[in-house]
Amino acid sequence: MSGLAEFGKRMKMFYARWSVYLDMLFKLVLALASFIWIRAMTGYSSLFSNVFLMLVLAILCMVLPLTAIPVFDGILIVGQAFSVGLDAGAVAIALYLVLLILFLRFVPDDAWEVAAMPVLTWIGLPVLLPVWCGLKRKPSALLAVDSGLVLYGFVRALHANEEKLTELGSSAYASRLKLIIGGTFSDRMVVLILAATAVIIMVYSVRNLSADNAFLISVPFGGAVYLAFILLGNAVLHTGMNLVTGIIGTVAACLIAGILEAMDTPLDYKKSEHLQFEDDEYYYYVKAVPKFASDSDKAATEPEELMPGEKRADDGPDRHDVDYEQKLEDSLKNL
Amino acid sequence: MVNPIRFEQMASLAGFESGRDGKLLRIARYYKSDYIAVQMIKTFFLTTIGVVLVIGLFAAGNMNMILDSVDDWNLTAVAAVLLIAYIVIIAVYLAVTYLTASRRWTRARKIAGIYEKKLRELELTGSSEAVPAGKTKRKGS
């Protein structure tokens, strides 16, 4: 564990030195991944699927705040939806307005998770972001995570019903809207949204317990909650989600989240101390958990080894040099 | 000659004025009741628009079912249910807005207090000013 702590400390120092460039790189990667996901799932419009447009927008996202990424995602998704039909475009705009007005307004700092969640769900790691949010953010982050899942559901509904929408034609509005809105809020998506919500709340609750290693215990606990929801969904609602890929994705996500957490919060629970003290107002029960010292910290605090007869520079006179008899006689003279 | 202590204080104050603390400083200029009232009015109108959109999306997604069965509905009961649901949703959102706005204003006042204290310290430090490179200080300034 101390090896991970050392590695985590080095990564933080590396990030502190290059944070400006690393932040830009992160924004570029997230923006590109998000645009590629949208293009892979839709691709109806030649304009909004244009690779050069995506590159230009991704480069713009590098220099704009993180909140620009979900905004550009929205532009691409709405553009692609309008290529499917006016009704799909109207639903896309209405959906975005509902999410913005009712949910995302309250979590402006978590806006980038709206873009990250669909990408992670698409690549098979849907539980990574909910676990990370439960560890590092407040429970209100579930608004952003669930909004990302709703957008994923909408794009997936367009993708899954592409043939049926083409067969129905542009004038069968009722049937088309039923397909699109029904697909967005299908049983499968509802189960995913409920699972992500439960994971965030449970991980947040467990990591705030005063038990030893609560941070690390909360990660597999979150994974287990997610798998329980998937199993329930398959059993009760017949959602038909693939359990094998679900387990692999959950285990991988938990490993990644656990390693990141161990690097960031390296606590040595074996050396915990329980203290009790009081002042005029309160009686305090305190649990103090020391952090793992990295190798460089240990070297700075451990005393250097001395050769026989060698003294440290800050040592006082050797006890064998003191003449105690003379000191006693001197003190008796002063009585 | 740059006064290093004054420079550090000015840099600290500049940090307060930018980013999240800058927004909180602007919030602290309002009276608490005014700030909360503005936020609740915003929430009322936006939530109303949001609820209308949700009802619209639900109706659009179930248009066939609604058109087939609307003749059998007790429209008064449906309107009453929708109205009660709307009132409950608005009440919840207004309550959440009241709590978050109240907490945010309290935090803003604390930040403003720290900012004012640092400003007073800056005034007490002295009046030596940083001069741009290549220019000399004017006599009498």
Image (cartoon, rainbow, N blue to C red):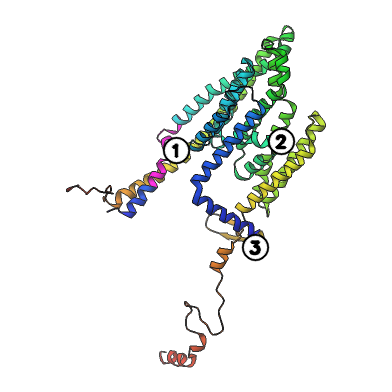
Q: Is residue B98 visible?
A: no
Q: Up-down: is A7 above or below A31?
A: below
Q: Residue at x 27, y 52 (%)?
A: B126
Kindly state the secondary structure of the residue where label 2 is placed.
helix
Residue at the image point whose x is 60% and y is 52% from the top: A264
Mark 2 → mark 1, Cα distance in angstroms = 35 Å
Q: Secondary structure at mark 1?
A: helix
Residue pointed to by mark 1:
B24
Main secondary structure found in the magenta portion? helix
Instruction: Write down the residue under mark 2.
Output: A195
- Residue A296 in the image: state x and y as whole percent: 56, 64
The three-letter code of the residue at mark 2 reads Ala
Q: Is residue A305 left or right of residue B118?
A: right
Decide: is A127 above or below A8: above
Q: Name the spot of residue A262 as percent of width and height, x first.
A: 64, 53
| Closer to us: A57 or A328 | A57
Residue range (magenta): B12-33
Looking at the rendered structure, whether the residues under marks 2 and 3 are on a common chain is answered as yes
Query: Which of the pair A172/A190 is nearer the observer?
Result: A172
- Which residue in the rendered view is the most extreme toward the right? A235
Q: Residue at x 82, y 32 (%)?
A: A235
Residue placed under numbered mark 3 in the picture = A271
| Residue A218 relative to residue B104: left or right | right
Q: Is residue B18 magenta?
A: yes
Please tell me which residue lies in front, A101 or A239.
Answer: A239
Residue at point 52%, 88% (across, down): A320
- The amino acid pointed to by label 1 is Leu
For marks 2 and 3 on the same chain, the one whose residue lies earlier in the sequence: 2
- Chain of the residue that carries numbered disc 2 in the rendered image: A
Are the residues at dot 2 and dot 1 in contact (C-beta closer than 8 Å)? no
Mark 2 Cα-neighbour bin, 10 Å: few <14, some 14–19, many ≥20 = many
